[in-house]
Image (cartoon, coloured by chain):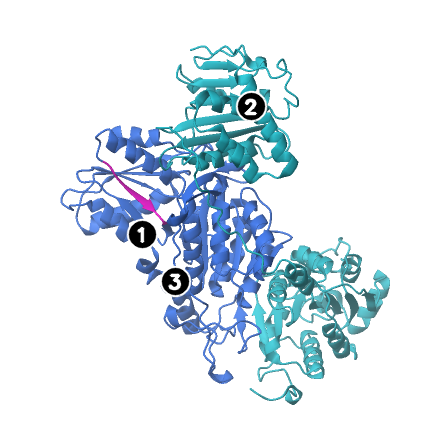
Chain colours: A cyan, B blue
Amino acid sequence: MTLPNSFFTTYRNERSYPFCPGCGHGLILNQLNRALIELGLDPKRVVIVSDIGCQGLGDQYFITNAFHGLHGRSIAYATGIKLTDPDLKVIVLIGDGGTGIGGAHLLNAARRNVGLTVLVFNNFNFGMTGGEHSVTTPLGGITATTRDGNLERPLDLCATVAANGAGFAWRGTAFDRDLAAVIADAMRRECFAMLDIWELCTAYYVPNNEFSRKMLEEMRVALEMRAGTVHREARSEYAHAVRAAGAEHSGQPALAPKPIAPHFASTLAREFRFVIAGSAGGKVRSLARTLGEAALLSGLWAAQQDDYPVTVQTGHSISELIFSPREILFTGVIRPDALVLLSEEGLRMSGRYLAALTGESWLFTTPAFAALETPARKVILDFDAAGVGDSKKQLALLLAGAALRQLGLFPLEALEEAIRRGQRGPIAEANLEALRQSVLIADLPANPRS
Amino acid sequence: MREFIDGATAVARGALDSGCDFFAGYPISPATPLLLHMIRELPKTGGVAIQAEDEIAAICMCIGAAMTGGRALTATSGPGISLYSENIGLAIMGEVPLVIVDVQRLGPATGGATTPGQGDVQFVRWSTSGGYPIIALAPSSVAECYSFTRRAFDLAERFRCPVFLLTDKEMFLSMSTVEVAAYESPPVRARAAAAATPEDAFIPHGLAPMDALPFTPIGGSHIVRFTGSSHDEYGFLTKNPVAIGRLNEHLRCKIEDHADEIDFARSDLQEDASTLFISYGITARAMAEAVLQARTAGRAVSSLTVQSLWPVPEAGLIGALCGLTCAEGVERVVVAELNHGDFRREVERVIYRWAAETRRRPLQIVGIHRVDGELITPSQFLEALLA
C-alpha cells in the first residue's frame, strides 16, 4: 500500500468483532479507529499490543501491526518494542484483569514514563473465564468468586499511575462521546498515557449485579474516583531518554580484549595451588586477580576461583589460585600447596584446606594463628611488631607478598607491574608500598618448621 | 598472548561481537555480571540495556525488542528461569530469535546463590507447556563462553527460537587464562529480511524451510502480526485443526529435523579404552584432567564433552561408544554432572535404543552426581575408572 496517509478512511480490516451483544469492547475499538483516522498515521508505524481476555482479541480487527502475548504482560512487551523503536506509536489494550496480574509492569511503565497509550477495558470482572472478580471489582460486587459480595477495595488505576509519574491519566466510559478525541490526544503525547475506560460486561457483571450504563456514573461517584483528565505531567519519555543518555557513550570501544604480554620468567615446573583465606572487605579477591595477572606476566597460566557468602561486606572470602606452566583444566583446589590465612572467618571456612596440608605444604599466617596444629611448614609473620603501617588493611598483600618471595613462584617485579596495570594512582602506590614492606619483613627471622 | 578473564566477560564480548543490541535482565547471583557488562557496554554500540522490574518483565521486553528487530539477550539463574518459563513458551510459539544465558546455581528454590550447579538441564528443555524443543549449548571453557555465545546468536537467527547458553557459577565467575588466538569466531548470520512483496502476498508466519524463513520487524516494511495463540500463517487466531497441527509440528520439526546440523560434542578417544567418560560444562574440565592423569598412569580411557545439551548429540555419543576401531567399543559409560542425573537420562535413552536396534547387550551406565555445592573432582572420575 503506497497511499498517502490521508487516504486511510479506516484502520479496521474487514473482520467483524466477536464480542457479546451490549459488550463495551467494540465501542472502545471503534473509538480507537476514529482516533487513528484523526491522526492519519502510517499503519506500519503503529502497533497494537493486546493482553489476554476478551479485549485481547481486539488487535485482530486493525490493519496495523499486532502483538498478542501473555496475560498481564502487554505493557512489558510494549516497553521492549518502544525501547527498540522509540518513534513507533505503541497502543496497549489491557483488561482490568491484566492490570492486576501485571500490576508491577503498569507501575513501572508509569514510573519510567514509557511512551505507551494504555487503554484499560475495565468491566470489573474476568469476562473470558466466567465472571470472576478482578482488582477493580467494586466493594459488594457479585462475581463468580465473590458470591456474597466483593470484600476487596477496588484499585484506583488512575490515582495509582498518577502518583507514580505517568504523563497522562484519564477516566471515562466506553460511552463517552469524546473518547476518540481523548485517545488521539493521548497518542499525540509522548508519555505514559493511561485511559481507565469503564464499560459493561453483559455476559457476567451486568446480569450478576443488575448493573447498567447509568450505574457506571453512580458507582464512580460513590467510589470517589475522578472522571476526565485525572493527571497530566510533563516528563521526558523514557525510550527517547534512554537513547539520549546512551548516545553520550556512543562510539567508545566495547570490551576489547586486554591481552597480557609476558616479559618476566618463572621457573615453576608444575601446578601450584595457592589459597588465600580471609574476610570480606579484606581485598582477598582483588589481590588474587592481581596475582593471577602477575602470573600471566611471567608466562604462566593462572586460574582463580572465589568462594564467598551471599552477603557482601561480611563473612568469609576465599580465593583459590592455581599457577601452572601448562593449561589448567580443573580449576578447583583440593590440596593447597600454600595456604595464606588472614582471619578467623577465613579459618572457619578453611577446615578442608588445613586437613589436606602435608609436610610439603606451606602455611603463611599471623601470630594470631601461631598455635594451629599442622604438618605444613608454618611461616608466622608479625607485621605489627615490625611496625608496618596499615598492616590490618594490607594484610592480604603483606602475607601474599612474603609468601611469593619465600616460594619464588614468579618475580615480585611481575606483581608490581600487575598492581600498576590494574590499579590507579594512590591505590597502586599504597599497594606497592605494602609489597615493599612485606619483602622487608620476610627478611626478619621467621620460624618455618619443616 | 594470553588473557586473564572470566566467563561472564567472554559471554558479553561474544554477544557484542554477534551484534546484540538489546539486553534486559534482573539482578540475580551469579548471572548479574552479564547485566552489569551489558548496561555498561551496549550504549557504546548504540544498543539498549535495561534492568527490568522483575524477570518476567525482562524476558517480555526481550521478546518485544526481538520482534521489533532487536538482537536480544537476557541472563538469569534457575529461580529466574522459573519466572521466564511462560514466556519461553511464547518465544517458541512466536518464533522469536532470543538468547537466554542460564548461569546455573545450586537448587532447589533459593538454594546456593553463590554455589555452582548443573541442575537446569532438563528444566530448560521442558520449561514450556507442550514440551516443545529448544536449543541449549554448554561451554566448558572461557574461550567457548565466547564462541558458543556467537553460535547461540546464529542458531537463534536460523531457527527463530530461544537458544540457551547453559553455564554455571564457576565457569561464569572464575578467572581463567585464555590464549587470545584460541577464541573461535563462528559466523553469526544477519536476520533474514523478508522480500519486498506486495502486502497481500506477505506471509509473516510461513512454514517454509528454516533458511528461508523471512523476518520483518514490527515497524518495518510489512505489517506484522505476532501472537501466542494458535494461529495461521498470517498471524490470525485459528481453531482450524489442520492449521494448528501444521504450526505445532513445524515448531517441533524445525529443530528435530535439523538436529544433526545443530548438535555437537568433542570426543577424545583412546584405543582399547573400555570406559567412556561423558560430561559437559565446568565438570568436563575435571574430566579432562582425569583423562590426562589416567593416561599418564597408563590407563586407557575415552571421553566425550557434550557441547550441545539440546539437541542431544546422539551421533557423537554412538560414535564415541564404538570407539576408534568400532570392533569392541566401550563397555562402561560414566556420566558426571552437578545434579541427580539430568543428562544421564538422555545417555541412557540413546544407548538403550541403540542397543535394542543393533541387538547389542546394553552397556553399563553409571553416574557421578554431586549436589553439595562442590565441584566434581578429577579423583572422582579416576575412582570411577578403577571401580
**Kind of element beneath mark 1:** loop
Q: Foreground: B84 or A165? A: A165
- Amino acid type of disc 3? Arg
Percent x, y of residue A133: 69, 59
Q: Which residues are magenta?
A: B301-307
Q: Is A265 in the magenta?
A: no
Q: Foreground: B232 or B304? A: B304
Q: Dot 3, how many residues are within 10 Å of its Cα: few (below 14), some (14-19), or many (20+)?
A: some
- Amino acid type of disc 1? Pro
Pointer 1: what residue? B313
Pointer 3: what residue? B252
The quarter of the displayed image where residue A149 is located: bottom right
Q: Dot 1, how many residues are within 10 Å of its Cα: few (below 14), some (14-19), or many (20+)?
A: many
The quarter of the displayed image where residue A232 is located: bottom right
Q: Foreground: A210 or A160? A: A160
Left or right side of B125 for B81 = right
The numbered dot on residue A346 is: 2
Q: Is B303 in the magenta?
A: yes
Marks 2 and 3 sit apart, C-alpha to C-alpha, by 51 Å
Q: The residue marked by circle 1 belongs to what chain?
A: B
For the point 58% across and 30% down, the residue is A432
